[in-house]
Image (spheres, rainbow, N blue to C red):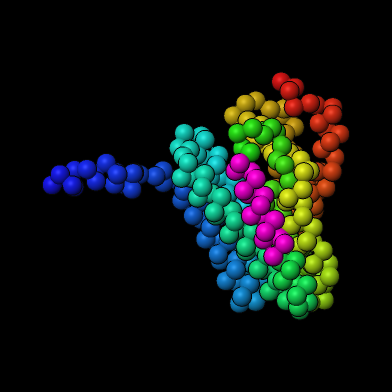
Amino acid sequence: MERRRLQRPNARPFGKSIFLLPNLLTTGALFAGFYAIVQAMNGRYEQAAVAIFVAMVLDGLDGRVARLTHTQSAFGAEYDSLSDMVSFGVAPALVMYVWSLKTMGKLGWVAAFIYCAGAALRLARFNTQIASSDKRFFVGLPSPAAAAMVVGFLWLVDDYFELPGPDVRWIAWCVTLAAGVLMVSNLRYYSFKVLHLRFNVPFMVLPVAVLGLLLVSYYPPMVLFALFSVYVLSGFLTPWVLRRWPADTP
């Protein structure tokens, strides 16, 4: 009995509860990434691309929901990173490899691995610098945006141009490699974390938002790829933005 009493305090942490809603959203993002891999293996590349974009939406919601409901936790942060690695690191690399890069032999899987490793390094750096970094900017291309760049290209080529992956393998190789390198670069990308949706905004923000939704719904592959391409290129303009609005600006 004495031994059981001594062991009971050590066993209590395993019985701690977790917050359901944000972790449920994270699980949905993880499932979407896994589903994308399965669909790519079955040759359904459009469904794979859509699944990764769904993972992006769920990944964007889980953090905001946790902050709004005051359900943030260390467990949720770690779980979110692991989910991101699957959905925006492993899944895009494998989807692109199966769709196009496998026809290039070693060059193909090397590009896919560089992307995957870049996502892992990007997430590790983000987790270690989260307390000291400027909240307005990400250092390196965020892994969801890198995933959108890769699978957005796939979706556009497969749906609009109706070209098989092997026909554009060199472009796919460059896109995959560039996304992996940008994730570990020192370029700064706007994080959108300083946007407070609860506060008043100018009236014109609403029509612009509605127009954006209409454009996305009109032809998602082209509009989404164009939007994320602009975001990727925006990192090269950030040094000018930082010079004009320094980090200590209130």
Q: What percent of the width, then of the height, locates residue 229?
A: 80, 52
Snapshot quadrant of residue 170: bottom right
- Give 89 or 63, whichever is nearer the viewer: 89
Image point (46%, 51%), residue name: 24
Q: With 32 as the anchor, is 121 left or right in this view? A: right
Q: What percent of the width, then of the height, locates residue 33?
A: 58, 61
Q: With 90 as the anchor, is 2 left or right in this view? A: left
- Give 48 or 87, whichever is nearer the viewer: 87
Residue 193 is one of the magenta-drawn residues:
no
Residue 225 seen: no
Image point (67%, 59%), residue name: 117
- Residue 201 vs 27, above or below: the answer is above
Snapshot quadrant of residue 246: top right
Please give the count of numbered marks on the rendered protein: 0
Pick out the residue farthest to the front: 3
Image point (29%, 44%), residue name: 10
Q: What percent of the width, then of the height, locates residue 37?
A: 60, 68
Q: What percent of the width, then of the height, locates residue 80?
A: 53, 49
Q: With 249 as the anchor, is 77 left or right in this view? A: left
| Prevailing secondary structure of the magenta residues | helix
Snapshot quadrant of residue 120: bottom right
Image point (54%, 54%), residue name: 82
- Residue 241 vs 121, above or below: the answer is above
The stretch of residues the image draws in magenta is: 113-128
